[in-house]
Image (cartoon, rainbow, N blue to C red):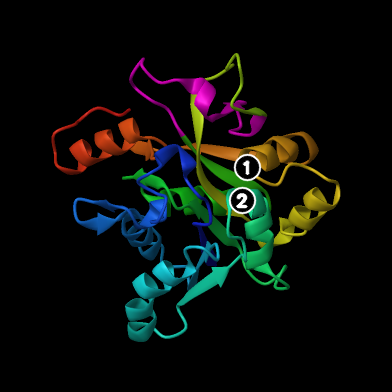
Amino acid sequence: MKALILAAGYATRLYPLTKDTPKPLLKLKNRPIIDYILEKIEQVGDVDQISIVTNNKFYDQFDQWLTPKQAYFPGRYKLINDGSNSVEERKGAIGDIHLAIGNDLMDDDWLIVAGDNLSDFNFNDFIRFSYDHKPCHSICLYLPNGNHVDFKRFGIAQLNEFDQVSNFEEKPEQPKSNLIATCIYFIPKEKLYLIPKYLELGNHNDTLGSYISWLAKNDKVFGKICDGTWFDLGDFDAISEAVLYLNGNLTFSN
């Protein structure tokens, strides 16, 4: 299995903090956000290569961060430049996945993780669930305990009795569920051909949620409700809460 961290966004909602520093390299408790994600992926024994896709604007910063790891583990890490220099030029999440997978469409399963997620999920549990539901896609879902969550900000899934995604909406005006898609996805090698097909049909290339919504209608997607705490580090409030959580001063599941 290969893993891919999506880190090519521009995080304009966090300006000026992210104007000259990519969000995944912002430090929480003296560690870059992406280090926490990498640590989770490294716990999955089946992953034999980890790719990070970024943009041209921040490529050098990621290269500086990754070079010591590449020197210590030759061949394990791969940094990909999607060539964009601005929000207007970005390829979007689906475009970056397509770029990263390249021509090796049928060789490996893929674990896809957004570079701005922070969680204490057990990735091995999710991978076991995903293997049980091959050759279909699987997504990791989060069920918040609190009542203060604005579900309209997220991709929202509904599951049937067999854990299959029966409906998926990206940032719905009227959410039909409280199951949040966390941007942790498993794409089996048998279904990788659907990514270029989706793009060739002219579908939205910016959000993974749009792709999952399309898959739920045209194929099968299964969802695992992952135990633990999860943060979508998309704004200053979420980052502040994540820092409190890492420091042991916040104990709720947001």
**Closer to the N terminus: mark 1 or mark 2?**
2
**Residue 84: where, in percent of width, then height?**
61, 61
Q: Secondary structure at mark 1?
A: loop
Left or right: 243 in relation to 55: left
Q: Are marks 1 and 2 in contact (CB under 8 Å)?
A: yes
Residue 183 position, x and y percent, is: 51, 44
**In this view, 238 is above or below 99:** above
Q: Is residue 160 above or below residue 81?
A: above
Query: Residue at (45%, 37%) from the top-left corner?
Result: 13
Kindly identify which numbered label has been placed on residue 173.
Answer: none
Identified at 47% across, 63% down, the residue is 58
As for residue 180 lying within the magenta part, the answer is no
- Which labelled disc corresponds to residue 93? 2
Identified by mark 1, the residue type is Thr
Rendered image quadrant of residue 207:
top right
Question: Which is nearer the eye, 163 or 178?
Answer: 178
Q: Is residue 213 visible?
A: yes
What amino acid does circle 2 point to? Answer: Ala
Write down the region rendered in magenta: 142-166
* Foreground of the two, 25 or 245: 25
Crowd band around label 2 with a 10 angstrom C-alpha radius: few (<14), some (14–19), many (20+): many
Q: Residue at 49%, 57% (x, y): give it.
A: 7
Query: In x, y percent, where is residue 162?
Result: 61, 32
Please name the residue that numbered disc 1 is placed on: 207
Query: Which residue is most to the right?
Result: 201
Magenta segment: does it hold 153?
yes
Q: Is residue 238 above or below residue 5?
A: above
Residue drawn 63% across the image and 58% down it: 96
Residues at marks 1 and 2, CA–CA distance in whole angstroms: 6 Å
